[in-house]
């Protein structure tokens, strides 16, 4: 009996110590009063400031949802524009608290950088854009083509793998930033431009003559995009991960910005747990129990954010596809809040 009591006491002490150690990022964010979010800065639909300096995009709204959960104020975010080359260093050094910058989850990134991917907020894949005048209808017709691509990305590696696998010759023209690569393509330095398909939809709109270009049908890779945090802070990892899952769950339950207050009166157990009228799931994260209500009320559910930024309500007009809910033919699936 004594041994059992001692073990229980030791477990409690270790649990408190682990909790204190893991709360470092949340405590820093609360003390600072703002979340530092590493963002793109040049990609329409995901992370782009307008002429007035107001940021918009799917990744941007994710960071606002995180701020809403913590502060009950989605404006308490500082967006730090990062290139593909410096994004991981900025997170590792503590310059940002979370990286939400159309970043692909791979095994090497997940295991060798001291970082954790939290969830897949957008299922993507790499494609190609060419001029209609080239009269190319398939990526398999790009043998010996010059292709503009951003260096230091999974895009660059996938490009080389695709051409090698299909026994085609490739002239890779690399650039430090996506902006430079796109401008080079637009000025005819390359036959084709390659990046994630979602990126092609937005980048095409930036070209001098949008209608002169087409996106080829092939998707040559899996590009699961999502937020990234540092190793060693499980509480912050959980908060970032469950922010996405709360937005997906809200869509699944039919809860939106417009009707979330009405659902506060719901007797549905799943709704009650999500909105914090039953259970202490927010406290378990180190937040208030109405954390998900704050997200939905101030930012919206996943579907609302998707449609507003990259879907039919945006200039990109991207269909839900793989990013639809699991019960509507897509892959977005959230573990239960219970």
Image (spheres, rainbow, N blue to C red):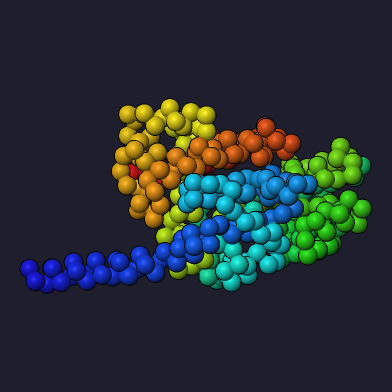
- Classify 73 as above or below 91: above
Q: Please state, as top left, top right, bottom left or bottom right, where the N terminus lies in the image.
A: bottom left
- Residue beneath the point at 53% across and 50% down: 67
- Classify 77 as above or below 132: below
- Residue beneath the point at 44% across and 40% down: 293
Asked whether, in this view, residue 288 is left or right of residue 143, the answer is left
Asked whether, in this view, residue 258 is left or right of residue 284, the answer is right
- Residue beneath the point at 52% across and 66% down: 230
- Give the tally of numbered discs: 0
Closer-to-camera residue (227/320): 227
Asked whether, in this view, residue 166 is left or right of residue 39, the answer is right
- From this viewpoint, is residue 208 visible? yes
Q: Quadrant of residue 212?
A: top right
Q: Please state, as top left, top right, bottom left or bottom right, where the C terminus lies in the image.
A: top left
In percent of width and height, residue 85 lies at 70, 66
In percent of width and height, residue 7 lies at 18, 70
- From this viewpoint, is residue 199 visible? no
In percent of width and height, residue 46 lies at 67, 47
Closer-to-camera residue (76/198): 76
Name the outermost residue toward the left. 1
In percent of width and height, residue 261 lies at 44, 30
- Classify 323 as above or below 175: above
């Amino acid at each position: 009996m004594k041994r059992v009591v001692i073990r229980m006491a030791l477990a409690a002490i270790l649990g408190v110590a682990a909790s204190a150690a893991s709360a470092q990022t949340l405590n820093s964010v609360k003390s600072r009063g703002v979340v530092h979010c590493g963002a793109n800065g040049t990609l329409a639909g995901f992370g782009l400031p307008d002429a007035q300096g107001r940021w918009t995009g799917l990744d941007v709204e994710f960071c606002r949802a995180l701020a809403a959960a913590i502060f009950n104020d989605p404006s308490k975010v500082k967006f730090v524009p990062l290139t593909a080359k410096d994004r991981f260093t900025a997170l590792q050094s503590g310059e940002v608290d979370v990286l939400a910058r159309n970043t692909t989850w791979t095994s090497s990134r997940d295991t060798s950088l001291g970082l954790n991917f939290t969830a897949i907020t957008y299922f993507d894949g790499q494609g190609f854009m060419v001029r209609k005048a080239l009269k190319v209808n398939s990526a398999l017709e790009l043998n010996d083509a010059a292709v503009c691509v951003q260096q230091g990305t999974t895009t660059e590696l996938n490009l080389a793998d695709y051409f090698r696998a299909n026994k085609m010759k490739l002239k890779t023209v690399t650039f430090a930033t996506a902006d430079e690569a796109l401008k080079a393509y637009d000025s005819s330095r390359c036959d084709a431009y390659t990046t994630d398909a979602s990126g092609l939809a937005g980048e095409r709109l930036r070209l001098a003559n949008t209608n002169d270009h087409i996106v080829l049908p092939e998707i040559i890779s899996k590009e699961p995009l999502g937020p990234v945090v540092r190793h060693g802070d499980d509480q912050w990892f959980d908060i970032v991960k469950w922010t996405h899952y709360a937005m997906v769950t809200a869509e699944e339950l039919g809860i939106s910005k417009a009707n979330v207050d009405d659902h506060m009166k719901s007797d549905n157990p799943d709704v009650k747990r999500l909105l914090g009228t039953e259970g202490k799931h927010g406290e378990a994260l180190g937040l208030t129990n109405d954390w998900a209500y704050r997200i939905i009320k101030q930012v919206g559910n996943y579907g609302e954010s998707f449609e507003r930024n990259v879907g039919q309500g945006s200039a990109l007009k991207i269909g839900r596809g793989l990013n639809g809910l699991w019960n509507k033919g897509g892959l977005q699936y959230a573990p239960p809040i219970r």
